[in-house]
Amino acid sequence: MIERMDNVSIIVEDLDATVAFFTELGMELEGRAMIEGASAARVVGLDDDMRSEIAMMRVPGGHGRLELTRFHAPAVVRPEPERRPVNTLGAHRVMFAVTDIHDTVARLRTHGAELVGEVVRYEDTYLLCYLRGPSGIIVALAEQLNRAV
């Protein structure tokens, strides 16, 4: 029986830039650590010389975490095409609820984020968009409209 979903892992090229991106979004850095050695390599199915650095990012309030991983060895494998469309099998996107989607998009653009499409209104319920951030990570944002007071 599942107790909880602990985290989602995303492989990144520039760990510092990605931490800054998710910090700007509002996540909190829980900690950073080097992961290496034979036991770590066996878990992920890589050679014993596997070395990576992780940064654990936490949603305020502790209801979700992202594990950002930068591999030092072996080198990362680049997907083809590198900027995969959002309908790619096994696609990667993380969605966050935000209070002001336009402000969030503007702040994330200072960290290199680009809109995949555009900010759209879904009925009278949400404003939604997809952004492409560091290492091609797709982040979806949702602002709920007409919240009950």
Image: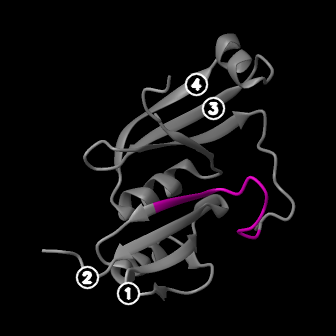
Name which quarter of the figure residue 87 lies in: bottom right
Amino acid carrying mark 3 in the image: Ser
Which residue is denoted by mark 2 in the rendering? 146
Judged from this view, the residue extending furthest toward the left is 149
CB under 8 Å between callouts 1 and 3? no
Left or right of 7 on screen, residue 100:
left
- Percent from the top left, x then y, of residue 111? 48, 70
Q: Regarding mark 3 in the picture, which secondary structure is present there?
A: strand
Magenta region, residue range: 85-95
Choose the circle earlier in sequence order: 4 or 2: 4
Any mark on residue 53, and which? Answer: none
In the rendered structure, which amino acid carries the disc numbered 1? Asp
Verify CB contact (< 8 Å) between mark 1 and mark 2.
yes
Mark 1 Cα shell of 10 Å, populated few (<14), some (14-19), many (≥20): few
Vertical order, 89 against 29 (above or below): below
Label 2 – label 3 distance at C-alpha: 44 Å
Q: Is residue 120 above or below residue 11?
A: below
Towards the viewer: 84 or 24: 84
Check contact, mark 4 vs mark 3: CB within 8 A: yes
Label whose residue precedes the other's in the sequence (2 or 3): 3
Distance in Å between CA atoms under marks 1 and 3: 44 Å
- Of marks 2 and 3, the one in the foreground: 2
Residue underneath mark 3: 52
Q: Which residue is mark 1?
A: 124
Q: Is residue 2 visible?
A: yes
Q: Is residue 94 magenta?
A: yes
Q: Is residue 141 left or right of residue 130?
A: left
